[in-house]
Every structure is written in structure tokens, then in C-alpha cells.
Image (cartoon, grey):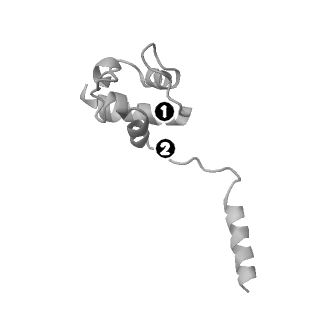
Amino acid sequence: MKQLVFLLCSCLLIACTDGEEASPYVDGEDLYMTSCSACHGSDGRGSNLGPDLIWDVGEQTHEGIVETILEGTGRMEPVDVSLEAADAIATYVTEEILIDW
């Protein structure tokens, strides 16, 4: 009986999915804190290792911030993250850090 219930549940689970894996939620704040805050500070105000984001990237577009994250600049090495992660970081920066600008 347990095997039959397991088989039915498994079939139901397979039938309810379309075969594609759901993309995991990407948290821009967590990614920023682990990938960016060491240089730019937890509040984006900079440190002795990196500039204040409000003054340094305040006029960049969202796409420009993503590009900077992925490709780096003359002063900054590229960050080793996916496009999805870079987009999440850029969203966090523009919606939470640059909001004061």
C-alpha cells in the first residue's frame, strides 16, 4: 500500500511540473553584502578599498551597473556572478542604496 501511495504521489508531482526547473530566488542584498560590501561598504558609502556608490555610479543606468559588475572597470575587477545575480545586485543598488541620491 505504501508503494502505491508513493507511486501515485510521484506521478502527480511529475504531472504538475512542466519539466523546467524553477529559477531560485536571487537576493540582491545578500549578493551585494557578500560580493560588493567589502569595498563599497554595507551602505554603499565606500571604504578605503572602493568608492562611494552614490557618487561613483549614481548617474549610471541599471544596465550600466550590471555591465560594470560583470565586466569591471579600470579600477574594479569583474565580479564572478551570473547575469541574473548581477541584475539582482544592480536592482538592490538602484532601489536601496541610490534611493538617497
Inter-mark Cα distance, 2 to 1: 9 Å
Q: Is residue 74 left or right of residue 48?
A: right
Q: Which mark is residue 35?
A: none
Check disc 1 and report its element: helix, strand or loop: helix
In the rendered image, residue 23, in percent from the top left (x then y), is placed at: 58, 47
Residue sitting nearer the eye, 22 or 35: 35
3 to 96, vertically: above or below: below
Image quarter for residue 47? Answer: top left
Q: Is residue 88 left or right of residue 44?
A: right
Check disc 2 and report its element: helix, strand or loop: loop
Within 10 Å of disc 2 (Cα), the crowding (few <14, some 14-19, many 20+) is some
Within 10 Å of disc 1 (Cα), the crowding (few <14, some 14-19, many 20+) is many
In the rendered image, residue 83, in percent from the top left (x then y), is placed at: 55, 32
Q: Residue at x 42, y 31 (%)?
A: 90
30 to 64, vertically: above or below: below
Tag 2 near tag 1, CB within 8 Å:
yes
In the rendered image, residue 96, in percent from the top left (x then y), is placed at: 32, 35
44 to 55, vertically: above or below: below
Which residue is under mark 1?
87
Q: Amino acid at mark 1?
A: Asp
Q: Earlier in the sequence, mark 2 or mark 1?
A: 2
Residue sitting nearer the eye, 74 or 12: 74
Query: Which residue sits furthest bottom?
Result: 1
Image quarter for residue 74? Answer: top left
Query: Which quadrant of the figure contains the C terminus?
Result: top left
Q: Residue at x 50, y 47 (%)?
A: 25
Q: Amino acid at mark 2?
A: Val
Q: Residue at x 32, y 24 (%)?
A: 53
Which residue is under mark 2?
26
